[in-house]
Every structure is written in C-alpha cells, then in structure tokens.
Image (cartoon, rainbow, N blue to C red):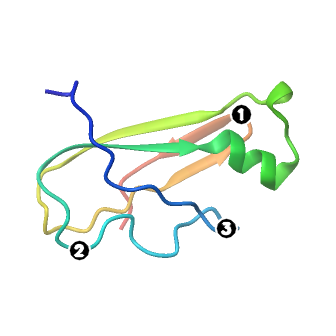
Amino acid sequence: DGDTRESLASVQTNDDGRTDSPILPAGAFAVGSYELVFQVGAYLDRQQGQTKANRFLDVVPIRFQIDDETSHYHVPLLVSPFGYSTYRGS
C-alpha cells in the first residue's frame, strides 16, 4: 500500500561511496516497492569537508519497483554537493 515500511538492511558505503557487497543477499528480493535512503549529507561532510551549516543536500530517498525478483538491480546514485541523479544500472 506504500504506507507500511519495513527496514531490510542498513549498510555504510566505503571511501568510494559504494557498498562492498550487495545490500541484500541473492534470493531476498520479492516483487514490490523498495526505497533506498542515502545519507548524502554525512557522506559529503566526510569527503568534502562540508558541515551541516553549509549543506544543500542531506537525505536522498530513491523509491523504485522490482517486477522480476530474479533480475539484477543496480541503483547508483551520482551526487555532487548541489544535485544528484540516479538510474537503473547494469
């Protein structure tokens, strides 16, 4: 229904801003709606010396659908201090 949420995992990215392994193990996905919540403010603070006082971005949620649980889903977030983009990667 979109109103009920359940946390499935929490991971921290490495110095490159990537996870070292898949967020969920193979077989853990099901058809449905998902949301990734990126704490980009904290990441940018570490990488670029920003502070809460001069941040433009802080939290970036990405909501997407899985329609085939056997497919590969790569959801990159490209972020700069003042904008971001995302797409379904390969």
* Quarter of the rendering containing residue 81: top right
Q: Residue at x 57, y 34 (%)?
A: 59
Q: CA distance from mark 2 to mark 3?
A: 23 Å
Q: Is residue 73 above or below residue 36?
A: below
Q: Residue at x 64, y 35 (%)?
A: 83
Write the residue at 20% across / 28% down.
2
Instruction: Compare marks 2 and 3 and give the one earlier in the sequence.
Output: 3
- Residues at badges 1 and 3 in contact (C-beta under 8 Å)? no
Point out residue 37 in the picture as x, y percentages from the top left corner: 46, 42
Q: Are marks 2 and 1 in contact (CB under 8 Å)?
A: no
Q: Secondary structure at mark 1?
A: loop
Q: Position of residue 5 (x, y in %)?
A: 26, 35
- Residue 6 figure quarter: top left
Q: Position of residue 49 (x, y in %)?
A: 88, 47
Q: Nearer the viewer, mark 1 or mark 3?
A: 3
Which residue does the numbered mark 3 point to in the structure image? 16
Mark 2 or mark 1, earlier in chain:
2
Residue 22, horizontal then vertical, whole percent: 39, 70
- Label 2 environment density (alpha carbons within 10 Å; few <14, some 14–19, many ≥20): few
In the image, 21: left or right of 26?
A: right
Q: Amino acid at mark 3?
A: Asp
In front of the other: label 2 or label 3?
2
Quadrant for the N terminus in the image? top left
User: For residue 82, which numbered disc appears in the image?
Assistant: 1
- Where's the C terminus, which quadrant? bottom left
Q: Which residue is mark 2?
A: 26
Q: Secondary structure at mark 2?
A: loop
Q: Residue at x 53, y 45 (%)?
A: 38
Q: CA distance from mark 1 to mark 3?
A: 18 Å
